[in-house]
Structures are given as structure tokens and as C-alpha cells.
């Protein structure tokens, strides 16, 4: 019996969590500026939600889902991606009836995919995602892309590449679909087993195959851009025009199809060009998915979104040498010597915390020297010392660690004085 974490999962320890918290807080602030609201959906859904939403022909549904039967015989699946669950919640809770449209949502969620673990790609992964539902305006496609780029740039990443494509509307995709079948059928036996099936079920996904990407037929495959009807061409031009207006650089890649069945019109990926980042360069990907809401019994609802892996974001920050601000330093550490001082320290710590001060004290019964060393390790800004003399005089010795300056202050004034020091107010 193994008592280690399951393969493809990791423990995020306290020394690492602060980076996660910093990134999440920055992203939440950006979402607030863009007027997106948080949604939280269940960690598991009825399996049909992903079969319908993600698509039966995708690798996620066919190979990667963690699916099980509950005691009632119902088939449930740990969520492998975020969009289908949000779409289900949108319909079930009738968010399409809200007076304020579009409905603009974001989420932080754990995803589960049974795939070969490698750096930046785990079986339990953490994702930030955006979904904007209820607008067919190309401007919101540009807004969603802008939000994703803003997240990366605000955190300090510079080696970024935005790749975009249009998958067209239903009519355009059908024509392209038949052209792909005609193109790849003579080479069918040369393709991998998965692509032989994809050619019949969803030929667009042949272009997304990692095994056959070097096959000569891939380089001569018909481009979706040659099959866009006028409406789809106009839509794509408007999206590009909005990106140009915001000064967002992009590269058009006709082979970008994404790995999920639900995309149409705009598709995009953001990649890292940082040296040493690794072979898998994609940081985020998304696109428009008009039609999914109807799959869940909702009204015709255009929508667009993206998913961003947080593990890969942290890898990119590391690759570019971006330092996470150290927010783990203590405001102050209380040192107590003697039983009466210990009791006074407990009350002082309580009062300081109640007034918003980040404070800790010794719980190992160390001598004064050991407590001062602990305060130094925690990089406390101030040390508050309580000994027999301080208790007798109802005072506290305050030491500023950066300068070594000490002063004795009345106990009754210590909370106001210390909060003033920490906020840059009166001393």
C-alpha cells in the first residue's frame, strides 16, 4: 500500500502557496476591472455534461476522464475542464434571464485528467477560466483575449505569443470538413489509429494530432480560412480590428483548431517563447462556442471563454525570472519571559490581531535568545518584548528590527502606536 500522493498529483506546501495566492489575487483584481464575477461549480458532474459539452470525439472524453458510478448507479465524472460545467449552471439557474447581459464569469477550479504526467501537466491541475455568455459581438472576443494577455503582462511576463484563427460558422466548417476528408482519405492508412477514427468523426481534429504533425499531408491540408463564408470572414476581420485597436500583437495560424469540439469562429492560444520553458509552450487557450448552451436545453446563446493553467503560469514566471513579492514577513513578534509576561503576551497578541496586525509569538517555551532568533527568521518588522520589568510597569519594549532602535511604551498605547508605525502614520 502506497502512502505517497497519487501519480500526477502534488502537495503545494506553505512555502509555495504564497506564490499561488499572489497570482490568484492579481487575477481577481484584473477580473474586477473587467467586470467579471466569480462562479463556483461542483467538482463532479453527471458524465453526460462533458459528453455533450466537450464532445464525444475528444481525447478528454474518450481517454482522460475520471468517471465512476455512485451508489445510486449514476455515472459521474470529475470535471476535466471548466466550460461545460459553467454552461450547465448557466442553463439550470436561468442566468440567460438576467437583465444584465452578457453574463461575464470567472472561476478558479481543480481539473482532473488521466494523462501521462509531465512538467506542467498533471492529473490534478489548477485552472483559471473566463466565460462570457450572451453576446455575439466580436468586441467581446477581443476583450476576452485582452483579459488573458493582461493577466500575463501584469504579472511580468514578456515572452508571449498570441496565435489566433477562425473556425468559421457551421456552414464554413461543413465545407472545410468535407475538404479535409477528401484530402486525408488517400493517406488514411498512414495516419495513427486515433486520426483514422477522427477522419470519420471529426476530421478537423486530425490537424491537432501530435503523432502525425510531421506527416507531409499536414503541410498541404486545406486551410479553414479558404472556406470561410462572407459572414465568417467579416466576423474575423472585426476581431482582428479590435485587437489592432488595443495594440495587441498576434499571429494567424490556420492550423490552430483547439482540442475540443465546441469551438467555432474565434480560436486562440497564448504561448511562452521564454528560453528553457519547455517543449509544451501553450499557456492558455480558448475561443467562441456558440451552440453549447442549446446542448443543455437553453436558448440560443453565443459565448466565448478560455482556460489558463496556473501550474504553467507559475512555470513561465520562473522561466522569465519574475520574482513573486514576499508577503510572508511578520508585522511583529511578541517575546515573553516569565509566566506573568506570557499571560500578558497572549492578551497583547489577541488585541493586535483584532486590529489587523499580523503577529505571532513563541509556543515552544524558548528562552529569550531563542525567541529573538525566531523573530529574525520570520523577518518581523518589530519585536515586542515583555519581561518582569515590563509587566511590573505595564509597559512594552518595542524594537524596530531594521534599525535596532528600541523604545519603552505604555501597554495601553501599544496597539495604536504600532498600527500607526505599520501604516506610516504617527509614531
Image: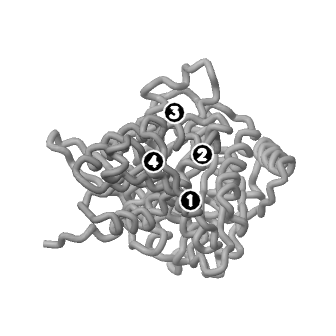
**Quadrant, the N terminus:** bottom left
Residue 405, which numbered label? Answer: 1
Q: CA distance from mark 1 to mark 2?
A: 54 Å
**On the image, numbered disc 3 is attached to which residue?**
294
Task: Residue at 61%, 43% (x, y): give it.
Answer: 427
Q: CA distance from mark 4 to mark 3?
A: 50 Å
Compare residues 272 and 250 and report the one nearer the observer: 272
104 up-or-down from 358: above or below: above
Task: Residue at 27%, 49% (x, y): give it.
Answer: 342
Q: Mark 1 packing: few (<14 Cα in 10 Å), some, or many (20+)?
A: few
**On the image, numbered disc 2 is attached to which residue?**
305
Q: Earlier in the sequence, mark 1 or mark 4?
A: 4
Residue 324 percent coordinates (x, y): 58, 63
Query: Of discs 2 and 4, which sits in the foreground?
Result: 4
Q: CA distance from mark 1 to mark 4?
A: 20 Å
Q: Earlier in the sequence, mark 4 or mark 3?
A: 3
**Are circles 2 and 4 on residues that touch, CB within 8 Å?**
no
Compare residues 73 and 179 and report the one nearer the observer: 73
Query: Of discs 3 and 1, which sits in the foreground?
Result: 1
User: Is 256 positioned to the left or the right of 54 in the image?
Assistant: right
Residue 284 percent coordinates (x, y): 59, 58
**Are circles 1 and 2 on residues that touch, CB within 8 Å?**
no
Element on which disc 1 rests: loop
**On the image, numbered disc 4 is attached to which residue?**
358
Residue 134 makes an appearance in the image? yes
Q: Quadrant of residue 322?
A: bottom right
Element on which disc 2 rests: strand
Amino acid at each position: 500500500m502506497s502512502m505517497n500522493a497519487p501519480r500526477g498529483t502534488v502537495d503545494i506546501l506553505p512555502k509555495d502557496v504564497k506564490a499561488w495566492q499572489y497570482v490568484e489575487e492579481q487575477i481577481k483584481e484584473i477580473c474586477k476591472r473587467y467586470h467579471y464575477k466569480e462562479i463556483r461549480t461542483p467538482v463532479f458532474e453527471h458524465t453526460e455534461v462533458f459528453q455533450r459539452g466537450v464532445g464525444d470525439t475528444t481525447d478528454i472524453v474518450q481517454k482522460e476522464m475520471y468517471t465512476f458510478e455512485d451508489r445510486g448507479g449514476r455515472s459521474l465524472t470529475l470535471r476535466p475542464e471548466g466550460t461545460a460545467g459553467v454552461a450547465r449552471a448557466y442553463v439550470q439557474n436561468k442566468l440567460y434571464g438576467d437583465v444584465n447581459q452578457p453574463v461575464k464569469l470567472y472561476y478558479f477550479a481543480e481539473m482532473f485528467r488521466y494523462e501521462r504526467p509531465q512538467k506542467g501537466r498533471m492529473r490534478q491541475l489548477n485552472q483559471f477560466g473566463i466565460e462570457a455568455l450572451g453576446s455575439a459581438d466580436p468586441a467581446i472576443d477581443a476583450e476576452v483575449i485582452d483579459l488573458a494577455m493582461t493577466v500575463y503582462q501584469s504579472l511580468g511576463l514578456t515572452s508571449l505569443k498570441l496565435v489566433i484563427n477562425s473556425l468559421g460558422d457551421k456552414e464554413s466548417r461543413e465545407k472545410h470538413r468535407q475538404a479535409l476528408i477528401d484530402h486525408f482519405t488517400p493517406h488514411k492508412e498512414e495516419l495513427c489509429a486515433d486520426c483514422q477514427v477522427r477522419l470519420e468523426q471529426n476530421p478537423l481534429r486530425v490537424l491537432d494530432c501530435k503523432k502525425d504533425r510531421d506527416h507531409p499531408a499536414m503541410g498541404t491540408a486545406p486551410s479553414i480560412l479558404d472556406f470561410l463564408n462572407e459572414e465568417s470572414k467579416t466576423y474575423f476581420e472585426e476581431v482582428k480590428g479590435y485587437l489592432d485597436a488595443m495594440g495587441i500583437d498576434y499571429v494567424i495560424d490556420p492550423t490552430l483548431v483547439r482540442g475540443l469540439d465546441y469551438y467555432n469562429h474565434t480560436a486562440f492560444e497564448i504561448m511562452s517563447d521564454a528560453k528553457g520553458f519547455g517543449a509544451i509552450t501553450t499557456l492558455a487557450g480558448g475561443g467562441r462556442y456558440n451552440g453549447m448552451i442549446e446542448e443543455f436545453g437553453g436558448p440560443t446563446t453565443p459565448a466565448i471563454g478560455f482556460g489558463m493553467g496556473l501550474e504553467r503560469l507559475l512555470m513561465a514566471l520562473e522561466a522569465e525570472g519574475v520574482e513573486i513579492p514576499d508577503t510572508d514577513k511578520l508585522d511583529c513578534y511578541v517575546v515573553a519571559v516569565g509566566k506573568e509576561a506570557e499571560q500578558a503576551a497572549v492578551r497583547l497578541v489577541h488585541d493586535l490581531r483584532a486590529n489587523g496586525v499580523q503577529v505571532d509569538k513563541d509556543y515552544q517555551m524558548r528562552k529569550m535568545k531563542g525567541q529573538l532568533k525566531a523573530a529574525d527568521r520570520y523577518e518581523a518588522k518589530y519585536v515586542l518584548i515583555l519581561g518582569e520589568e515590563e509587566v511590573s510597569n505595564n509597559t512594552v519594549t518595542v524594537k524596530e528590527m531594521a534599525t535596532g532602535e528600541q523604545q519603552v511604551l505604555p501597554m495601553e498605547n501599544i496597539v495604536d502606536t504600532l498600527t500607526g508605525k505599520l501604516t506610516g502614520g504617527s509614531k
